[in-house]
Image (cartoon, rainbow, N blue to C red):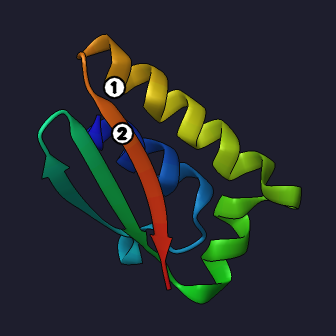
């Protein structure tokens, strides 16, 4: 799941080398924390939050295939 998330974020970010993803596991629940340059935050969130909602939906679908739950947080 982490590689999948990194691929998506790196394709959308203007400065993909500065994107950092940390994984916080807690049983069957995983929280991914995404740290970006301030100018890339808007690109990831998208207009009215549509892009981040789509990324979270894909992440949730991927996690359910592995019998887990996952969420994504953007850390500023």
Disc 2 to disc 1, C-alpha distance: 6 Å
The quarter of the picture where the N terminus appears is: top left
Q: Is residue 50 left or right of residue 2?
A: right
Question: Residue 39 appears in which quarter of the rendering?
Answer: bottom right
Whether residue 67 is situated above or below residue 3 in the rendered picture: above
At x 60% / y 70%, what residue is drawn? 14
The kind of secondary structure element at disc 1 is: helix
Q: Position of residue 12 (x, y in %)?
A: 61, 55
Whether residue 75 is situated above or below residue 62 in the rendered picture: below
Q: Position of residue 47 (x, y in %)?
A: 87, 59
Single out the residue that lies furthest toward the right. Answer: 48
Circle count: 2
Judging by the rendered image, the residue that carries numbered circle 1 is 63
Single out the residue that lies furthest toward the top. Answer: 65
Judging by the rendered image, the residue that carries numbered circle 2 is 70
Q: Mark 2 packing: few (<14 Cα in 10 Å), some, or many (20+)? A: many
Which is more toward the observer, 72 or 5?
72
Numbered mark located on residue 45 in the image: none
Which is more toward the observer, 2 or 17?
2
Q: Position of residue 76 (x, y in %)?
A: 50, 86
The kind of secondary structure element at disc 2 is: strand
At x 52% / y 84%, what residue is drawn? 37
Q: Is residue 20 left or right of residue 59?
A: left
At x 51% / y 74%, what residue is drawn? 15
Single out the residue that lies furthest toward the front. Answer: 27
Mark 2–mark 1 CB contact (< 8 Å): yes
Whether residue 11 is situated above or below residue 18 in the rendered picture: above
Q: Earlier in the sequence, mark 2 or mark 1?
A: 1
Whether residue 16 is situated above or below residue 60 in the rendered picture: below
Q: Position of residue 71 (x, y in %)?
A: 42, 46
Q: Mark 1 packing: few (<14 Cα in 10 Å), some, or many (20+)? A: some
């Amino acid at each position: 799941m982490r590689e999948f998330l990194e691929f998506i974020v790196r394709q959308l970010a203007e400065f993909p080398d500065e994107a950092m993803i940390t994984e916080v596991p807690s049983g069957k629940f995983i929280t991914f924390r995404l740290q970006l340059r301030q100018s890339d935050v808007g690109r990831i969130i998208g207009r009215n939050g549509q892009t981040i909602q789509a990324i979270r939906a894909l992440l949730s679908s991927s996690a359910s295939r592995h019998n887990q739950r996952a969420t994504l947080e953007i850390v500023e």
